[in-house]
Amino acid sequence: MAVKERLLQRHIITDASCQFCGVGETVIHSLLDCVIAMEIWNLSEYKDLLNDVPRLNFVELWSWLCRKVDASVLCAIAALMWAAWKGRNMMVYQGERLNGVLLAVGFARLVQDYNTYAEKVLLPPSIHGPAAATVTTVKKSFGTTLKITEAMAVRYGVMLAGRLGYNSIEVETDAVNVVAALKSSKSGVSPI
Ligand SMILES: [Zn+2]
């Protein structure tokens, strides 16, 4: 996630402060503690749970949640985090202040609809499924590069959206070289 802490580490910006709160913008801050995120969590049933999560980094936070709650709750929390990130991006890049609760309801419904649809039509997504196999094959063929893995993840997401009937989607990635390759529309020897 391209939060300011990461952008500073990559020397893309010189100030890692959240432009809304003034504190350092980390992944945890943008997903749990920033303006839109607070709006979402304060009215959610997970408020108390999230008060107890370890906040050192996202991996620790998510691992802790995996031990504490079942898959359906994890899925709901992920949807609300996704909504918080979307709300943050709308404020940062579009200057648009969305209602956090409405945003959260929309994302929760989207995930619920997807799960209902997936149960009926699709095989459950699995890290051992075809996508993972494809990524492994590509890694073997072209060497393990982050660029290829990121491109395969984008490809899988686009194909999944197509299967679900979406004809207009937004893809978020911080892999600039993958975006450049996709936009160039040129064919060549690059595995992307
Ligand atoms: Zn903030």
Image: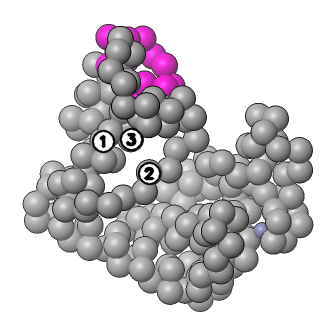
User: Would you say residue 115 sits in the magenta stretch?
Assistant: no
Quarter occupied by residue 91: bottom right
The residue lying toward the viewer, choosing from 112 and 96, is 96
Q: Secondary structure at mark 1?
A: helix
Identify residue for label 1: 156
User: Would you say residue 145 sits in the magenta stretch?
Assistant: yes
> In the picture provided, is 182 more to the left or to the right than 93?
left
Q: Where is residue 14? Give x, y as percent.
A: 89, 44
Inter-mark Cα distance, 1 to 3: 5 Å
What amino acid is found at the position of numbered circle 3 in the picture? Answer: Val
Q: Secondary structure at mark 2?
A: loop
User: What are the residue bounds of the magenta stretch?
Assistant: 138-151
Main secondary structure found in the magenta portion: helix
Q: Where is residue 121? Give x, y as percent.
A: 10, 60
Q: Where is residue 57? Give x, y as percent.
A: 70, 49
Whether residue 9 is visible to the viewer of this picture, yes or no, is no
CB atoms at circles 3 and 2 under 8 Å apart?
yes
Q: Residues within 10 Å of mark 1 (few under 14, many from 20)?
A: some
